[in-house]
């Protein structure tokens, strides 16, 4: 049976009020109640909301982390500023197109119905022009001040998020965010390419860390708001396969994520003791949370705690990368081995 047929008959039990912290802090009037002329401040706020700025912040932390490692803690500040800004503008463009394409389902979900397009505060044509302008500015900035590879990677991020995730897989497969998640893993590649002009194994390991981090991050959220996804017919894993199968998958990807995060220490040898110990500690805490979720897969509070921790995990992992890249804090794995007592026969 096609996946789309499975969720069609799902009952729409109402999601308890656990998504409150994902809801807007201010309420917006629906289009019919909009004042005819809106102030500049409101207009700027609406266009900013269209770009999903809070998500962009973490994307940029991963870009900056990659740049920091690629330059061994000695990054050119102008290059960092240009790359992070260019990356942010590319992600803003991608998010705007996603909002444009998804405005029909966004209108029906409580979490997203306040967004500027479904609530009529921005016209679709204006959003499209805005997104195209952002993509052009991002490409020009990165190509002129970083390099062509970084610019092309940023454009491939937009294409993957829009083409593969939003248009192709989001509404047709439970594996939508596994494959589409590749888009969110591109920002560190942009950062690495901006510094070195190419992509080494370490850059691909950074890509892999975010790639395997994305399913636990997103499926935890999907567990919280599964009824909303069922209501609009989006085949997210918990809707189609159930909460237990989703909790299993979250644990599986979390278990995979820890060794993947350690590849930067061995064999890549770009990170040392500080990062290694942090990655293990952060990873063990993630596994603990995933195990809690497996015990109570239908508990939305536990799912929310995993979702929130996923964000903290990635941010702290990047901080650990930053600290470890400082020459004063870097103790390589070879140095650790040399410090171990040698046992002669
Ligand atoms: C395709 C992969 C991904 C999917 C489907 C996904 C999905 C989501 C969704 C639906 C939300 C709730 C957003 C809202 O209600 O406004 C969210 C929140 C968030 N996501 Fe992801 N995400 C993905 C990848 C990423 C990546 C790669 C990052 C950063 C590296 C990220 C960072 C965040 C952050 C920081 C939030 C919290 C935003 C807030 O405070 O409201 N996500 N994600
Ligand atoms: C380099 C580059 C430009 C990369 C782009 C990366 C990017 C914008 C990733 C965003 C990931 C994300 C927020 C997915 C949520 O989509 P959703 O449609 O499931 O969320 P929603 O339900 O909140 O709309």
Image (cartoon, grey):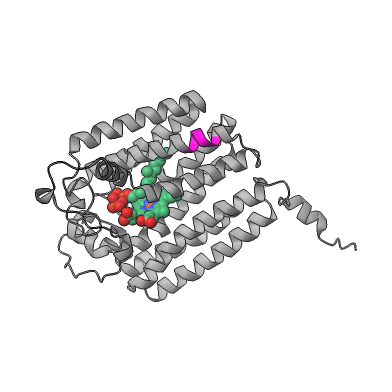
Note whether residue 241 is visible.
Answer: yes
Residue 18, percent from left and from top: 30, 69
Residue that appears at 28% across and 49% down = 170
Viewed as shown, does residue 231 lie left or right of 22?
left
Name of the residue lying farthest toward the top: 144
Residue 225, percent from left and from top: 28, 63
Q: Quadrant of the N terminus?
A: bottom left
Viewed as shown, does residue 315 lie left or right of 38?
right
Residue 83 inside the magenta-drawn segment: yes
Labels in figure, total: 0
Residue that appears at 29% across and 65% down = 20
Magenta stretch, overall SS:
helix
Decide which of 209, 342 is in the foreground and name it: 209
Decide which of 119, 280 is in the foreground and name it: 119
Residue 336 inside the magenta-drawn segment: no
Residue that appears at 40% across and 66% down = 248
Residue 160, percent from left and from top: 36, 39
Q: Is residue 337 above or below residue 196?
A: below
Decide which of 272, 262 is in the foreground and name it: 272
Q: Is residue 161 above or below residue 141?
A: below
Q: Which corner quadrant of the image does residue 228 belong to? A: bottom left
Part of the protein shown in magenta: 80-84
Residue 108, percent from left and from top: 17, 55
Decide which of 299, 121 is in the foreground and name it: 121
Q: Is residue 198 above or below residue 216?
A: above
Q: Which corner quadrant of the image does residue 238 belong to? A: bottom left
Note whether residue 178 is visible.
Answer: no
Q: Quadrant of the C terminus?
A: bottom right
């Amino acid at each position: 049976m096609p996946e789309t047929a499975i969720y069609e008959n799902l009952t729409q039990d109402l999601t308890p009020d656990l998504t409150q912290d994902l809801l807007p802090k201010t309420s917006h009037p629906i289009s019919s109640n909009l004042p005819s002329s809106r102030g500049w401040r409101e207009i700027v706020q609406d266009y900013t909301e269209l770009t999903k700025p809070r998500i962009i912040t973490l994307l940029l932390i991963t870009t900056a982390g990659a740049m920091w490692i690629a330059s061994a803690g000695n990054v050119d500040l102008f290059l960092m500023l240009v790359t992070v800004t260019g990356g942010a503008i590319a992600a803003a463009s991608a998010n705007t197109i996603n909002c444009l394409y998804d405005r029909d389902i966004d209108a029906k979900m409580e979490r997203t119905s306040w967004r500027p397009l479904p609530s009529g505060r921005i016209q679709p044509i204006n959003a499209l022009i805005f997104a195209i302008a952002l993509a052009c500015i991002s490409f020009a900035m990165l190509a002129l001040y970083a390099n062509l590879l970084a610019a092309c990677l940023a454009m491939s991020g937009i294409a993957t998020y829009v083409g593969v995730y939003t248009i192709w897989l989001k509404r047709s497969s439970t594996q939508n965010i596994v494959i589409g998640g590749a888009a969110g893993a591109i920002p560190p590649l942009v950062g690495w390419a901006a510094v070195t002009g190419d992509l080494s194994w370490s850059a691909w390991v950074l890509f892999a860390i975010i790639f395997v981090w994305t399913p636990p991050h997103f499926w935890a959220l999907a567990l919280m708001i599964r009824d909303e996804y069922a209501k609009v017919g989006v085949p997210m894993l918990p809707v189609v396969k159930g909460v237990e199968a989703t909790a299993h998958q979250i644990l599986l990807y979390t278990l995979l994520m820890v060794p993947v995060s350690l590849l930067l220490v061995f064999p890549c040898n770009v990170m040392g003791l500080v990062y290694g110990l942090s990655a293990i500690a952060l990873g063990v805490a993630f596994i603990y949370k995933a195990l809690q979720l497996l015990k109570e897969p239908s508990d939305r509070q536990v799912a929310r705690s995993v979702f929130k921790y996923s964000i903290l995990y990635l941010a702290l992992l990047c901080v650990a990368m930053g600290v470890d890249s400082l020459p004063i804090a870097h103790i390589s794995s070879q140095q650790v081995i040399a410090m171990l007592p040698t046992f002669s026969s």
